Amino acid sequence: MKKVITYGTFDLFHKGHYNILKRAKALGDYLIVGVTGENYDAERGKLSVQDSLATRIENVKKTGFADEILVEEYDGQKINDIIKTKADVLVLGLDWKGKFDHLKKYCDVVYLERTKDISSTQLRQENNRIYNYGIVTDYILNNDFIFDAEYVSGIHIESIFSENKEISSAICQRLHIDRTCVDYNQFLETVDIVYVNCETNKRFHYIKQALLQGKHVVSDSPMSLSPHEVKELYDLAEQQNVILLDNIPTVYVRTFNQLLNVVKGEVIGDIIRVNCSMSLEELSHDYSHSVYDAFYYIICILMKIFGENYKNVFIKNVDYQNDIVYGRIEFEYEHSIGYGELTKGIDHTSLMEIIGTKGRITVPQDWWKSAYFEATLYKENYTRRYCTNFEGNGFRYLIQVMLQMIKENQLQSQRLSAHDSVCIIEILKNIHI
Ligand code: CTP
């Protein structure tokens, strides 16, 4: 019996999929179809798949060509599948030409002509509204976040606004965007989503204007140093039926959510201490963060790990002298302590360590954009490593969630709510730099 194996996402099942399955089946007697798993698609940057895995499998089944269906969950799985299923032929569309020639050691590899003028990407674009995205910025350099949003399908970078015309023109040139606006209201008319990427003291004004015009907003954090103003913005967003999000990509990244689950699942026992340190240079390597921005980040992450029911919070040693900053924040909980450390101008590594009664979790350098962490259990003398893919600087995951929220008319983020933001500002306002 000649076995044929083929793979695909099979999103929004279309005639191209039907044709390739039919032709693949005709090359043998038994057809095995690998359908990509949801995590695998997310990890390889395919962020806009619409159908669930169950629906995609169901659609492949309905063709009647597949004798066996398996789920493709990781890079490199094809070799294992081919060996395990004793497949004689691997079939792929011509879009993959040459990419799987290394598998010729294991079976025949055949690339079939694609059906013309149809693809899932095209169908997604036809089905989906494209959201115009605009950026309010003060920075010409280090605004990688702008570029990262481009990877999310359904987003079109439409317009740039800067008080400084040279900055907006330079960014537009880099991004090949035609539209720069010198008038903020005019800019707002062109967009659906606004990203506020400017100095702390200007954010409130720009966010408020955008919300008043019914635009969804993602803003660098803090949005303001006044809890009242932050609350006002969230209330306004709710009234206007639009979404307002803090730009804290870490909380939207799968690795960090897995870490929270490991903590909540008490894999390392009860938490005794969390140490979370950040060097402003390492953060600003990506983007122009202020000391307040970095503290906001640290407080947010500590609160995500511990919750908001701290007994005391101390802010210590915040010195600002000759461009050197050393800041420390300490949360005291019933049975545990959370430390956050922020440095600028001194040699310091950004690490996160969570100590529990049974073990510890370590996230290496640049923990806020880490794809990796490990949990070591003391008694078992055993280390479990957790790893997921992480593309870009994480902003694309946030924008992806935001688009989903817009489509589902879900106004409040489950990852970082209005209440969370106000709690963070209540603490942050006590930091004097
Ligand atoms: N395929 C094809 N003809 C098309 C589209 C896809 O023969 N017009 C084939 C692909 O070459 C692949 C299989 O169908 O071998 C599954 O492809 P998949 O990536 O799921 O479909 P696409 O439409 O290419 O999806 P996307 O646009 O998301 O890349």
Image: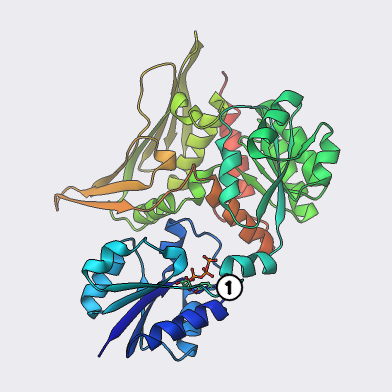
Q: Quadrant of the N terminus?
A: bottom left
Q: Amino acid at mark 1?
A: Lys
Q: Quadrant of residue 229?
A: top right
Q: Which residue lies at the image location 51% right of the left edge and 40% below the top edge? A: 300
Left-right relation of 140 to 270: right
Question: Label 1 neighbourhood size at 10 Å, few (<14), some (14-19), many (20+)?
Answer: few
Left-right relation of 235 to 1: right
Vertical relation: 278 (above or below) 124? above
Q: Which residue is mark 1?
A: 116
Q: Position of residue 425 (x, y in %)?
A: 61, 35
Q: Residue furthest top?
A: 322
Element assignment for label 1:
loop
Taking depth in this image into account, of 149 and 429 the one nearest to the observer is: 149
Vertical relation: 224 (above or below) 99? above
Q: Which residue lies at the image location 54% right of the left edge and 24% below the top edge? A: 291
Q: Position of residue 85 (x, y in %)?
A: 24, 79
Vertical relation: 285 (above or below) 114? above
Q: Position of residue 27 (x, y in %)?
A: 36, 85
Q: Is mark 1 within 8 Å of ligand 1?
A: yes
Q: How is the image coloured?
A: rainbow
Q: Position of residue 430 (x, y in %)?
A: 58, 26
Left-right relation of 191 to 270: right
